[in-house]
Image (cartoon, rainbow, N blue to C red):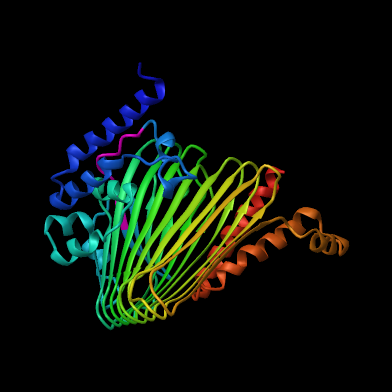
């Protein structure tokens, strides 16, 4: 006898299969077929999959929303950045707007790059990754932005890729940044306020050439309580390359943010940091795998999670040091702040080391606001909620130190202030 849950799962699987049937020939047919085969072996993950043990995506997606067939987009040159917006998972390159792109930067749509079978794009678009949701994204990708930055180019204005979700729909975007050898750039990845019932599976791929330097900031605004989002970052680093990546998550529904980084070249460096703010019944899962595949690599992971109400925070971090990757230097830290008795935090840091002469360590802590500090602030005439907000801002702000761009740092700080203001209104 088939139970109701099994029927729902069958309906979700059937919807995804129908979407693949529609898209299997929509550019990169071989890549899509391989990705669909990889996804089909496991299907939507649940808690029985070790890397998804704290987040049951299959249960959250019993009903897969239909995507919008076509959407709109725009490209604009703002005062402080070049902004690429994806609406309803569609990007359309407008030559007049793109002409304003800085020298050394070429921007196009993923759809047109796939149609032209651009070999460089196809080679970089799907790095090896053993994750069913990343495979599903590759199989069903609708569109995205492709930014190619010439070797040696120094781009002083951030490039923003902004995904704007629409209500009651699923969307599958995949964007690609190809950073040439010795180039320097800043990429901002942003997700607009989550619309009602939105389901998103989004991937951003970085291919960072030898000696190149990339700063990356992700800003995920609050979403509706019934939204489901998986946002994946896949990156490879060449010899002597560096990546400094920061993420701010402001909760809303279920969100899984996952990072897959491979340090392929010798002497490269990757820094990943972030702050997650949760309240109500939010569920946010940050999971990352950092793979050191060459000697002399350095990685740092520093994350802060603030959990209020009945929300659940997750941090899973794994650093893998491959044979021969001697003199690897890796450190990982997760700190969580629980603001209510009903708040939950799950920490799972891991190290897998298959090489000698390495220095790797990890740590995870979970605690509450310091009562002595609260008393000190309140005794100076600061109201209790204000005192809490000051301590929370200070805790989250520790993670902001890695953001080099002052304007972006201020923008992120305003996001924290907005979240705290909402928390105060709800009290």
Residue 405 lies, in percent from the top left, at 49, 75
Towards the viewer: 373 or 166? 373
Query: Against 295, is 165 above or below?
Result: above
What residue is drawn where x is 28% and y is 62%? 176
Residue 28 lies, in percent from the top left, at 15, 53
Most prominent secondary structure in the magenta stretch? loop
The quadrant of the picture occupied by the N terminus is top left
- Which of the 4 image quadrants contains residue 282? top right
Residue 190 lies, in percent from the top left, at 43, 58
In this picture, residue 219 sits left or right of residue 96: right
Q: Which residues are magenta?
A: 64-74
Looking at the rendered structure, the number of numbered marks drawn on it comes to 0
Does the image show residue 410? yes
Asked whether 298 falls inside the magenta stretch, the response is no
Outermost residue, top direction? 1
What residue is drawn where x is 17% and y is 59%? 113
The quadrant of the picture occupied by the C terminus is top right
Does the image show residue 89? no
In this picture, residue 41 sits left or right of residue 198: left
What residue is drawn where x is 48% and y is 43%? 254
Towards the viewer: 263 or 312? 263
Residue 424 lies, in percent from the top left, at 70, 49
Asked whether 69 falls inside the magenta stretch, the response is yes
């Amino acid at each position: 006898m088939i139970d109701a849950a099994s029927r729902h799962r069958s309906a979700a699987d059937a919807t995804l299969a129908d979407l693949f049937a529609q898209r299997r020939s929509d550019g990169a047919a071989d890549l899509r077929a391989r990705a669909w085969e990889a996804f089909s072996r496991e299907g939507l993950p649940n808690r029985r999959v070790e890397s998804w043990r704290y987040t049951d995506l299959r249960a959250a997606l019993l009903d897969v929303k239909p995507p919008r067939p076509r959407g709109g987009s725009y490209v604009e040159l703002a005062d402080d950045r070049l902004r690429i917006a994806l609406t309803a998972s569609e990007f359309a390159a407008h030559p007049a707007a793109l002409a304003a792109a800085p020298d050394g930067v070429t921007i196009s749509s993923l759809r047109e790059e796939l149609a032209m079978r651009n070999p460089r794009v196809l080679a970089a678009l799907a790095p090896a990754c053993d994750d069913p949701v990343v495979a599903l994204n590759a199989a069903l990708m609708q569109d995205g932005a492709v930014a190619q930055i010439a070797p040696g180019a120094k781009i002083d204005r951030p490039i923003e890729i902004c995904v704007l979700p629409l209500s009651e729909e699923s969307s599958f975007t995949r964007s690609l940044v190809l950073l040439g050898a010795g180039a320097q750039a800043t990429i901002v990845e942003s997700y607009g306020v989550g619309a009602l019932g939105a389901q998103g599976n989004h991937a951003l791929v970085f291919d960072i050439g030898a000696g190149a330097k990339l700063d990356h900031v992700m800003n995920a605004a609050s979403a509706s309580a019934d939204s489901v989002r998986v946002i994946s970052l896949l990156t490879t680093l060449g010899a002597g390359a560096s990546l400094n990546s920061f993420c701010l998550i402001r909760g809303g529904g279920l969100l899984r943010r996952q990072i897959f980084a491979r340090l392929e070249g010798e002497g490269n460096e990757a820094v990943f940091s972030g702050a997650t703010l949760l309240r109500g019944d939010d569920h946010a899962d940050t999971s990352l795998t950092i793979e050191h595949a060459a000697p002399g690599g350095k990685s740092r992971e520093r994350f802060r999670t603030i959990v209020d109400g009945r929300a659940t925070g997750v941090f899973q971090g794994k650093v893998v040091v491959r044979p021969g990757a001697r003199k690897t230097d890796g450190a990982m830290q997760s700190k969580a702040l629980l603001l209510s008795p009903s708040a939950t935090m799950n920490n799972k840091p891991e190290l897998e080391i298959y090489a000698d002469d390495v220095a790797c360590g990890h740590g995870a802590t979970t605690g509450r606001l310091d009562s002595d500090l609260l008393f000190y602030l309140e005794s100076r005439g600061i109201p209790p909620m204000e005192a809490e907000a000051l301590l929370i801002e200070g805790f989250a702000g520790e993670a902001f130190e890695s953001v080099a761009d002052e304007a972006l740092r201020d923008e992120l700080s305003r996001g924290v202030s907005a979240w705290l203001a909402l928390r105060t209104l709800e009290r």
